[in-house]
Amino acid sequence: MRNKAEVVIIGGGITGCGVAYNLAKMGLTDVVLVEKNFLSSGATGRCGGGIRQQFTTEWNIKLAMESVKRFEKMNDELDIDIEYEQGGYLVITDDEKELEEFKKNVKLQNKLGLDSKLITPSEAKEIVPYLNEDNILGATFCQSDGHAYPFRVVQGYAKKAKEMGVEINKFTEVKSIKKEDNKIKSVVTDRGEIKTNIVVNAAGAYSREIAGMIGVEMPNKPFRHEILATERYKHILDPMIISFKYGIYFSQQKHGEIVGGIGDPDEPSSYNIKSSLKFVERFTSVLGKIVPAFKNLNIVRQWAGFYDVTPDAKPILGYTEGIDTLIQANGYSGHGFMVAPRVTELIAELIVDGKTSMPIDELNLKRFEGETVGEVYVVG
Amino acid sequence: MKIVCRCEDVTEEEIIEAIDQGYTTLDELKKHLRVGTGPCQGRTCLKVIEKMLAKKLGKTIDDLKKTTVRPPLKPLPLYIYGDEDEE
Ligand SMILES: Cc1cc2nc3c(=O)[nH]c(=O)nc-3n(C[C@H](O)[C@H](O)[C@H](O)COP(=O)(O)OP(=O)(O)OC[C@H]3O[C@@H](n4cnc5c(N)ncnc54)[C@H](O)[C@@H]3O)c2cc1C
Ligand code: FES
């Protein structure tokens, strides 16, 4: 392992590996990435892989749209099959108030150039024949939304970054960070010390602990989210179906398994990562109302991962006040995979050029000292 | 060509190649090749793959990081878990 580097990236999920790739692409290759387990062992490798652009704030919509442009070219760019499919996202509702919100949101999305639209229950049934249209009032649909296989995306980023000269160390855990007069001096791992000035905090739900190592307090909280997969079936579902009201999402992956999850409003913040029966029960009972026939599918696996949640459900990006060279790239609050291609590019720009091609100042850690407007579309 | 994981149709050569590429844990092999994620939940293949991995890396089976066994152990229909007429 190298004992010094211009930049040390902590975390080998999509954020860390994406930053490593984009830094190298911009010419900065004196970079070491450290990951305590294997690459994508955190939230990235556990997530649903959903890629959605239907958001409610201008910034998130733009970010997601620009990320989709990058996902579309990724197979060629990273020379790997990320199993990307654009089957769309069908956002359903059975709630009049929510439907009114949908109208406003679609208007904003269309203004920004997104191909989302409001549709009727029978139009939704044309897209998903198994849908129980009696249980919904309306939906929005965006064809260019989709999903990819997160593990592959991470492998692709890491492989390219390595080829360009970045060092990637798996099974290397950061234990402490040394500083002098508020300047970072080195990162201490269980496999040695790396002298560096710049640290990227891409440790997902553990970012709070990493920041704590140099006395920086962060408001992020970990929340367990559970997810399951069925056996493989022939193609029966094109889009990802989600409901914000019930917190459910599910889609069929390229290889045929249906993968889905549901949030639990009663889940306390913790590092508990066990799978529960309660989750499968909740998931199945909501699923049965949306697509009754899917209750006959066989479940083969369930697992859990952490959402790294901030008070306004928006990520924390950029410099850290007091310790400028600690760069934050965390707090994705459950939708960090889909925006990573663009976010990690912006973080690399910040490090290499000192400025970004899209403003990120609003997402600085220091916003939590004042009021902020939150993102309300939070699910897979 | 010897098939090691029948559910996912993965051969011995593919596994050796993946280990050479740096996928050096069962977890990574599962994610990369999907071995052990089929309907048998790896009961047929994971033991064999573990042995291959240990041999190739010059380690004992105990040295290898144990992979998490994901519930359920057998595929079960979802309806067992929830009743749509519960209200
Ligand atoms: C069940 C579930 C479903 C989801 N579904 C979606 C979805 O459909 N679409 C979407 O966009 N997002 C989804 N998300 C959210 C998404 O997974 C995350 O926002 C995203 O993967 C975050 O990536 P990351 O690289 O920032 O963090 P992570 O992938 O968590 O990576 C952080 C890494 O840091 C490492 N680390 C931690 N501490 C240390 C240390 N001390 N030293 C070294 N390394 C350390 C960890 O091991 C980990 O690998 C989902 C999340 C969950 C849990
Ligand atoms: S033989 Fe490998 S999962 Fe069944």
Image (tube, helix red, strand yellow):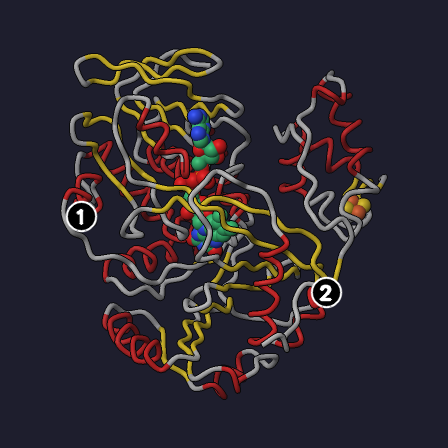
**Which secondary structure, mark 1?**
helix
Residue A350 against residue A288 in the figure, above or below: above
Q: Is residue A74 visible?
A: no
Residue A90 against residue A188 in the figure, above or below: below
Please name the residue that numbered disc 2 is placed on.
B80
Q: Residues within 10 Å of mark 2 (few under 14, many from 20)?
A: few
Q: Residue B33: x and y, percent?
A: 68, 43
Identify which amino acid the numbered label 2 is placed on.
Answer: Ile
- Parent chain of label 1: A
**Which secondary structure, mark 2?**
helix
Q: Are marks 1 and 2 in contact (CB under 8 Å)?
A: no
Please name the residue that numbered disc 1 is placed on.
A362
Please tell me which residue lies in front, A264 or A159: A264
Q: Residue B56: x and y, percent?
A: 74, 22
Q: Residue A339: x and y, percent?
A: 36, 51
Q: Residue at x 64, y 54 (%)?
A: A277
